[in-house]
Image (spheres, rainbow, N blue to C red):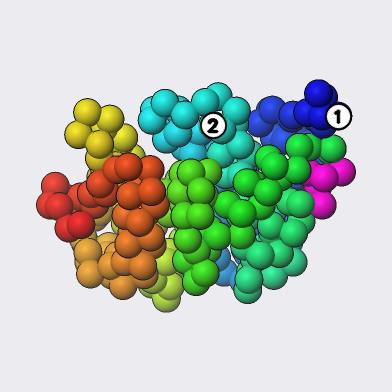
Amino acid sequence: MENNLYNYPSPKDIYENKEVRTYITVGNDNLEALGYTEHGFAHAKTCGDRAYAILNKLGHGKRTCELASIAGYIHDIGNTVNREDHSHSGALMAFTLLNRLNMDPQEIAVICSAIGHHDEKTAYPVNTVAAALIIADKSDVRRSRVRGSDITNDIHDRVNFAVIGSDLEIDTESKTCIFNIKIDTKICPIMEYFEIFLDRMVLCRRSAALLGLDFELIINDTRLL
């Protein structure tokens, strides 16, 4: 009966929340000023949808999938405060926001844990939602995230701009999570991808393992992990 005291907002409720939208906008503007790639609504929605899809494909319950979607959508709101330690500040902001919406504390805890553990400096797949968020976030590598035309000075811009195609597949039959990307090596050698993304891919492998999956990284038709 106690559960009736709480609200259970849907991902759509969170997506349309004015406070959430403000934090995503301001955080993205802050990162643009700092020279980072896009961290706005496109990234937020990609992560939310992808985290939901991962758990849904693996047969998790609808509400667990929705929590992954919510966590994925708001995981970067800490950029409103500062890029440094944004996962922890974002988790605290999420707690305040979701608590104000009178969300079930158990659900708040799951979402805040996932957000607080998504940045590779301190990340760990502490639960299924965190694992799905990590994979969704780290696999969002695409040309459209690059903001400017000059990609010569920043390796993150070069790597993202060089990606001409990517696909994340959950193969339930072989129990494998496959991240398949195509890179234009005239723009960026594969080694540069590894220079900035190896830690993230190892984290994806750890997250996949928590979900009962092997992780494969395929670049230009060659398996590298």
Q: Name the element at disc 1.
A: helix
* Residue position marked by numbered label 2 in the rendering: 65
Tell me which amino acid carries mark 2. Answer: Cys
- The numbered dot on residue 5 is 1
Q: Work out whether residue 126 can be spotted.
A: yes
Secondary structure of the residue carrying tag 2 is helix
The residue sitting at 32% across, 42% down in the picture is: 212
Q: Position of residue 28 (x, y in %)?
A: 65, 56
Query: Please, which residue is most extreme toward the front here?
Result: 1
Question: Does any portion of residue 166 appear in the rendered image?
Answer: no
- Identify the image quadrant of the N terminus: top right
Q: Residue at x 48, y 44 (%)?
A: 128
Relative to 185, does residue 49 appear above or below in the rendering? above
Is 65 included in the stretch rendered in magenta?
Answer: no
Is 98 in front, or is 44?
98
**67 displayed left or right of 100:** left
What span is in magenta? 96-100
Residue 189, image quadrant: bottom left
- 93 sits left or right of 224 in the view: right
Identify the residue shown where x is 82% and y is 45%. 99
The quarter of the displayed image where residue 32 is located: bottom right
Q: Residue furthest left?
A: 222
Q: Nearer the viewer, mark 2 or mark 1?
A: 1
Quick one: label 1, few (<14), some, or many (20+) residues within 10 Å? few
| Dot 2 and dot 1 residues touching (CB under 8 Å) | no
